[in-house]
Amino acid sequence: MIRLTEPGTLTIPLSVMTASPVSNIPPTIDFGIDRLPGKGDIVAIDSEFVSVQHEDSHVDMDGGKVVNMEGRSALARVSIVDSFGRVLLDDYVLPQEPVVDYVTRFSGIVASDLDPLTSKRHLVTMRTAYLKLRLLIDRGVVFIGHGLETDFKQLNVFVPPRQIIDTVHIFSQPRARKIGLRFLVNYLIGHDLQAETHDSIDDARAALELYAKALELKKEGNFDKQLTKIYEHGRKVGWTVGLSSDQK
């Protein structure tokens, strides 16, 4: 894992944003440096991970779980859209060690995506992916996402709290469970994420929509009431996704 946790300790050229992929494909995103967001600009981000080490554990004589070795994950894809939902980057990341599980059901990643010889994706090195993130962080960009604190911790990247807007915390009540992105988007926006395959661009755009919805509800003075309705509906349906007449 590359460790780039100290902001401002590395001068990163803007050209890193247009670095050539290691896969044999032409650029899929027409990215101009003039589109590069700066201080205070909002982007939405979603990251996907694959497993590079299974957890090794056993059950002891008292029925408790004993973890001998923690499982480990590695960044496999990072997608960022601007405040209008336009794709700024969508990088698949070349693994630095063997992948033991692509967790395709949740990540949408398959083996061929991360193989330079077969990938039809914009595949970059781990270092390039991290340098792009570090550049945006150092420029003061504000990141919107769902579960961002967890993602950045897993990435081992420090982002100043003032640059994080985490919708998992916006749509939560004290001492209550955290609500998943898919459930919130289904309830508030009315469409079903990941109905077929998982896509991190869709998730980034969904987080952006959720944030806009939160601002709208707060402006109308209806946020707390709507949040209570979300929790009531979630408990009623066991937090399964499905539109209901009592949502609005």
Image (cartoon, rainbow, N blue to C red):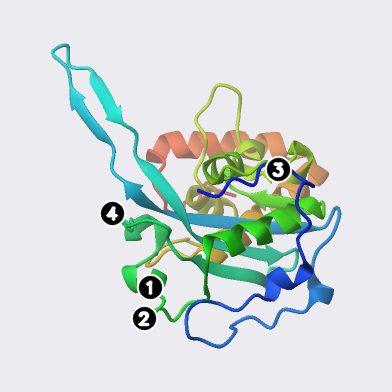
Tell whether label 1 touches label 2 (CB within 8 Å). yes
User: Is 6 above or below relative to 95?
Assistant: above
Which residue has dot 2 on it? Answer: 118
Q: CA distance from mark 4 to mark 2?
A: 18 Å
Which residue has dot 4 on it? Answer: 100
SS for tag 1?
loop
Quarter of the rendering containing residue 66: top left
Q: Residue at x 82, y 55 (%)?
A: 139
Extreme left residue here? 61
Count up the numbered dots. Answer: 4
SS for tag 3?
loop
Q: CA distance from mark 2 to mark 1?
A: 5 Å
Under mark 3, the amino acid is Val
Q: Is residue 216 visible?
A: yes
SS for tag 2?
loop
Which residue has dot 3 on it? Answer: 159
**What x and y, as percent, mark residue 115?**
38, 73
Q: Nearer the viewer, residue 212 or 135?
A: 135
Q: CA distance from mark 3 to mark 2?
A: 34 Å
Q: From the viewer's perspective, is the residue at label 3 or at label 1 nearer?
A: 1
